[in-house]
Amino acid sequence: MRVLLLLALSTTACGPAADPAAEPADPPRAQQRPLRRVVTAAAEEVALRDLVRLSAEVTPWASVTVAAEATGRVVELPAEIGDEVAAGALLARVDDEASRARLAQSEARVAETQAMLEQAERDLERGRQLAETRDISLTELDRLALARDTAAAQLDAERASTRLQRSMVDDAVARAPFAGVVSDRLVEIGSWIAPGSPLVRLVDRRRLKVRGSATQRDRARLTPGLPAAVRADALPGIAWQGSIRLLGQEADDATGTYLVEVAVDEPRAATGERLLPGMQGSIEVEIGERRALMIPRVALITTADGDGVFVVRDGDGDGEAGSVARFVQPQTGITSEDRLEILAGLAAGDRIVVAGQHVLHDGDPVEGEPVEDDS
């Protein structure tokens, strides 16, 4: 047994010794990054319409709440909600029977006093003729003149009273201050009202005002009179033409933005749809044309590091393709339905990954093929 143990030790000692300077073996193939096949598109510099786009709300050109000017019971409301009325059209009438009776009495007194004045003027004229032949005393002549002056003053008073009574009759009727549409009726027939009571809401929608808010930068690029397109969220695909009517001169304290108001003279589109007050939408003003670097919008992805795109870089990869994907977070500008503007971080001609980017990591070896042109 001792002989066998020594033999075994001797055999082990005579084996080849490990070389500490020897290079380690290549890691298993599974530990290397796999080659990713992706589809790319080039970043392109194109001519781009320079637009200012603002969120906006449609408002009526004018809107008023017509109020009562008399006290009484409402006896007539001819206009229903949604009715179009002309300027001066009757909107409401208060019971004015008593006012009309008082007006008739006042007009009668005016006629009576007018007759008294005419008689006093004839008496005075006759008295002056008699005074020339001394057939009447100067005292009597003064009395006739006083009677004429008294009648004239009384007539002025009666006429003033008549004007007052007529105004009370007129106040019993509420009329439309402009042509428009009745948007609300705030009383019903039989309601008892007082001066100042709201009766009818009237809006002028023959023209419209569209109001948006502009940042300081956009406000500086706009001027009154510039053509503008108005779009409504509820009516996609339709644009109404207008022009900038006014620009705010002071920023809103809460938002720091400036008012932009666009006038739309024809609210009805050629297809029949109508732009209505209260609709939400946008204002678009074309400033001109500029050069812009654009990439497909689909290339932009969100990662733990933020939003960005993968760009294929040549010559720094270890794989067979010799290219790797680098994650870049460019500064972006405006977006359209399928494209994204790049303000900084990319250059024209950069190959942007537009398919396969969601499984990439920065530095992955890639083999890219250009996106097929549908044209």
Image (cartoon, rainbow, N blue to C red):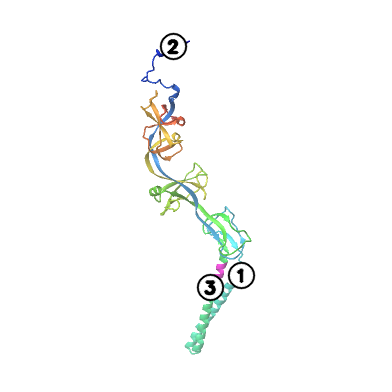
Q: Of helix, strand and loop, which mostly describes the magenta segment?
A: helix
Label of residue 101 in the image: 1
Q: Which residues are magenta?
A: 162-168
- Is 68 above or below relative to 19? below
Say whether residue 121 is visible: no
Residue 67 image point, x, y percent: 55, 61
Which numbered disc flags the more N-terminal residue, 2 or 3?
A: 2
Write the residue at 60% across / 68% down.
99
Say whether residue 5 is visible: yes
Which three-letter amino acid code belongs to the residue tagged 2? Leu
Which three-letter amino acid code belongs to the residue tagged 3? Ala
Q: Between tags 1 and 2, which lies in front?
A: 2
Which numbered disc flags the more N-terminal residue, 3 or 1?
A: 1
CA–CA distance in space, label 3 to label 1? 16 Å
Tag 1, which secondary structure? helix
Write the residue at 56% across / 68% down.
166
Which residue bears the numbered disc 3? 160
Whether label 3 touches label 1, CB < 8 Å: no
